[in-house]
Amino acid sequence: MRDEDFQPVAVKRVIKDMIRNFTRQDKQFYIDCSKTFYSSSAVDHQVDESNFATTFDLLMKGDPGVLGYILECDGERAGYFLASFVYSNEVGGTVMLMEELFILPEYRGHGLATSLFDYVKANFSDKVRRFRLEVTKSNVRAARLYERMGFKILNYSQMYIDN
């Protein structure tokens, strides 16, 4: 799903200043933040750091399966958000997988995550049937935030196998 496929809905005036598309100038910021994210308690496993550059390149090419935003606070980059899209028979439509939300520690608690989710819901509710995210058991603060925002727990484990 590309940004051209939807017209942004204004949730609050301040959100427009806080959420924007990635630009080429964001590459090192994004990679540095990704390294921090993937070495934190928000993630249970290691990833190949070359994936960060690959993801960034897909964002710059406008790949319809990936979406990303830079979050700003007072004109400074404060974090990033990544999502992907998949069809789900379970919900009978497209699911937005809210893949990553990272906010620099000094900007946490400023309402950026809430503003981001308000923005995403306002702009994608008519395009997706479900918003889905993952949270580790150790990331209690994030889990509480997501539950306050209306997310429900799915009681099953994820399994994977890499090619």
Image (cartoon, rainbow, N blue to C red):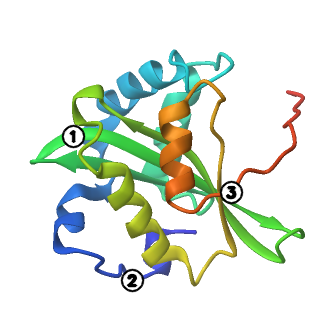
Query: Is residue 22 at least partly visible in the picture?
Result: no
What is the secondary structure assignment of the residue under circle 3?
loop
Tell me the quarter of the image containing the C terminus. top right
The answer to which of marks 1 and 3 sits earlier in the sequence is 1
Q: Is residue 45 above or below residue 141?
A: above
Q: Distance from label 1 to label 3 (Cα)?
A: 30 Å
Query: Is residue 116 at least partly visible in the picture?
Result: yes
The residue carrying pointer 2 sits among few (fewer than 14), some (14 to 19) or many (20 or more) residues within 10 Å by Cα, namely few
Q: Distance from label 2 to label 3 (Cα)?
A: 28 Å
> What residue lies at 32% left-to-right and 39% top-to-bottom?
79
Query: Disc 1 marks which residue?
Result: 77
> What residue lies at 28% left-to-right and 80% top-to-bottom?
10
> What residue lies at 17% left-to-right and 61% top-to-bottom?
17
What is the secondary structure assignment of the residue under circle 1?
strand
Q: Distance from label 1 to label 2 (Cα)?
A: 23 Å
Where residue 117 appears, as percent x and y from the top left, is: 44, 61
Q: Give the number of the disc on residue 7.
A: 2
Query: Disc 3 marks which residue?
Result: 152
* Frontmost residue, 15 versus 147: 147
